[in-house]
Image: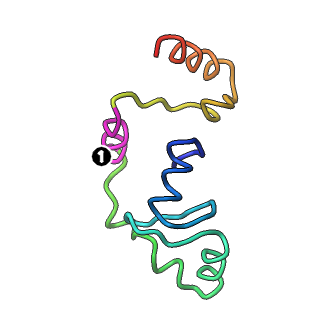
């Protein structure tokens, strides 16, 4: 999940040619925003669009893929702009000061 930031926010809007948030992607394809997702859920079509559990990687493989996606990956409570605990706030501060 990408939280709104200048890089994710502005760049993604231009890339997707979709003016609003949230934007839901499934398997790399833009499905749409909230109104479209609500319509898909109401019609029953949304469930058929979701990847099946059997096609997903096991948890260890998914975590390995996630933690190696970027040079630095931090899992925390909240967001870097709004940490939700003291530990997260402290590590964000340390990374900000050093980076």
Q: Residue at x 70, y 30 (%)?
A: 84
Looking at the image, is 56 positioned above or below residue 73? Answer: below
Q: Give how far across and how far down residue 17 sits, in percent.
A: 50, 66
Total numbered labels placed on residues in the image: 1
* Residue 26 on image: x %, y %: 44, 66
- What colour scheme does the image use? rainbow
Residue 5 picture quarter: top right
Q: Is residue 16 magenta?
A: no
Q: Residue at x 62, y 60 (%)?
A: 22
Is residue 63 part of the magenta span, yes or no? Answer: yes
Secondary structure under tag 1 reads helix
Name the residue located 61 percent from the left edge and 77 percent from the top edge: 36
Q: Indicate left or right for 65 with 4 as reference.
A: left
For image coordinates 46% across by 69% down, the residue present is: 30
As drawn, 93 above or below 43: above
In the rendered structure, the answer to whether residue 44 lies left or right of residue 53 reads right
Q: Which residue is mark 1?
A: 61
Q: Position of residue 3 (x, y in %)?
A: 58, 45
Q: Nearer the viewer, residue 45 or 96?
A: 96
- Magenta: main secondary structure equals helix
Q: Position of residue 79 (x, y in %)?
A: 62, 35
Residues packed near mark 1 inside 10 Å, few (<14), some (14 to 19) or many (20 plus): few
Horizontal side, residue 65 vs residue 52: left or right: left
Q: Residue furthest bottom?
A: 43
Residue range in magenta is 60-70
């Amino acid at each position: 999940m990408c939280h709104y930031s200048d890089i994710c926010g502005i760049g993604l809007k231009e890339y997707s040619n979709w003016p609003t948030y949230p934007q839901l992607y499934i398997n790399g394809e833009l499905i749409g925003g909230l109104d479209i997702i609500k319509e898909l859920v109401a019609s029953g079509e949304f469930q058929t669009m979701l990847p099946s559990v059997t096609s997903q990687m096991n948890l260890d493989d998914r975590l390995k893929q996630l933690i190696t996606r970027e040079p630095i990956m931090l899992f925390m409570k909240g967001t870097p702009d709004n940490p939700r605990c003291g530990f997260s706030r402290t590590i964000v501060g340390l990374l900000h000061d050093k980076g």
